[in-house]
Amino acid sequence: MSNPEDSAPTQQDVSLPPAPPAADLKSQSSAPSSFGVSEIVSRWRREDILKRRALALRGFAFIFSLLAFIIMASNKHGDWKDFDKYEEFRYVLAIEILSTLYTGAQVLRQFHELSTGKSVILPQKSVFIDFIGDQSAAYLQMSAASSAVPMTNRMREGSDSFFTDSLAASVTMSFFAFLSLALSSIISGYKLSTHSYI
Amino acid sequence: MSNPEDSAPTQQDVSLPPAPPAADLKSQSSAPSSFGVSEIVSRWRREDILKRRALALRGFAFIFSLLAFIIMASNKHGDWKDFDKYEEFRYVLAIEILSTLYTGAQVLRQFHELSTGKSVILPQKSVFIDFIGDQSAAYLQMSAASSAVPMTNRMREGSDSFFTDSLAASVTMSFFAFLSLALSSIISGYKLSTHSYI
């Protein structure tokens, strides 16, 4: 209702049919086909925009995951200042590796599809894979960031060093990756719901 | 473009008009209306099933959130065995209170709607509220459960007491609530995508 993006196509649908009677009678027979074509074109355009937005969001998720992974993996300063002495930071590293691989593969696939016009995976399967992948990756990123926050907080209370700052940076990148993936999962959920499975 | 998901409805639009001429000429006038009625009835039935499933899932989420909340809130055994001495467990408690209130309100609303047939909120608004609410609650539950796991693990390595068992129980309930809410958010995402905004 308050969303102009969705009320707009509806208004168009409603206002288009009354148009032909007002026009010349000769063009009446061609009106339904032109109505169908304009609807298809507007739908194609909407889908193209969605595809590009999904690509951009996954690109952001890839960059943030990669940053979180690199910052966490290089965070070894000896003694208690090794990230791999704490299970929550090892968990963050594992999730960031998975997320980097997943988003990287998705970006490569989508980029290839946009440039060549050929689909790598069957579209019937890809809508499922996209949605399940995005949604799972978003939950995992949320889980990784949340698990690392309490220990990072406790360490920062004691001492503020390069080690704790890097931990905080990695957690923040993980949270940004979560935001991108959460938005991307809304787009792939929309695509899955409007898919007709024929 | 290469997405059959969208070419399918288009095919349907194009192939529907030629169908009546192939059928008996007498039934030509009734064919479109009977097709429309059966389609609407099957859609109503599908929506009714979805409504009941959403109600069941939110009911489960409510029970699990309430259990997680009660188990965590009553987990005070003096000395270091007080849940409120640790920020992660206070966070779990806060999220469980929010989740219990949200799922409780949703269950009450849906139950009222199913029994009286009247909608409490405008359906145009409720699809947004449902999706955003379910999805946020699922992320928050995942966040709460994940944040509490590392400290619970560490405590269970040291000593296995009633306190640590209750922590584990509360985290598990929180995870079950997450699963229910994640499934519920898929249903409300589907409803949001297929909503016509008229």
Image: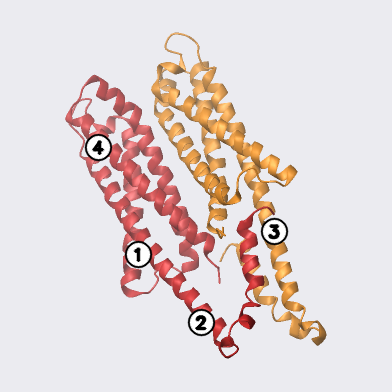
Chain colours: A orange, B red
Indicate the quadrant containing the C terminus of chain B: top left, top right, bottom left or bottom right: bottom right
On the image, numbered disc 3 is attached to which residue? A44
Q: Could you classify mark 1 by the number of other residues whose Cα lies within 10 Å: few (under 14), some (14-19), or many (20 or more)?
A: some
Q: Disc 1 versus disc 3: distance between alpha carbons? A: 38 Å
Q: Nearer the viewer, mark 1 or mark 2?
A: 2
**Disc with the residue nearer the chain's start (2 vs 4):** 2
Task: In the rendered structure, find residue B109 and report the number of the disc placed on it.
Answer: 1
B193 on left or right of B159? right
User: B24 or B147, which is in the foreground?
Assistant: B24
Q: Disc 1 versus disc 4: distance between alpha carbons? A: 29 Å
Whole-percent x and y of residue B159?
Answer: 21, 22
Q: In the displayed structure, would residue B141 be above or below residue A152?
A: below
Identify the residue at image location x=36%, y=59%. Answer: B53
Whole-percent x and y of residue A40?
Answer: 70, 64
Identify the residue at image location x=17%, y=31%. Answer: B162
- At label 2, the amino acid type is Ser
The answer to whether any part of residue A11 appears in the image is: no
Q: Disc 2 versus disc 4: distance between alpha carbons? A: 54 Å
Q: Secondary structure at mark 3?
A: helix
Label 4: chain letter = B
Task: In the rendered structure, find residue B169 and report the number of the disc placed on it.
Answer: 4
**Disc with the residue nearer the chain's start (1 vs 2):** 2
On the image, numbered disc 2 is attached to which residue? B34
Label 3 near label 1: C-beta < 8 Å? Answer: no
Identify the residue at image location x=62%, y=69%. Answer: B12
User: A146 or A13, which is in the foreground?
Assistant: A13
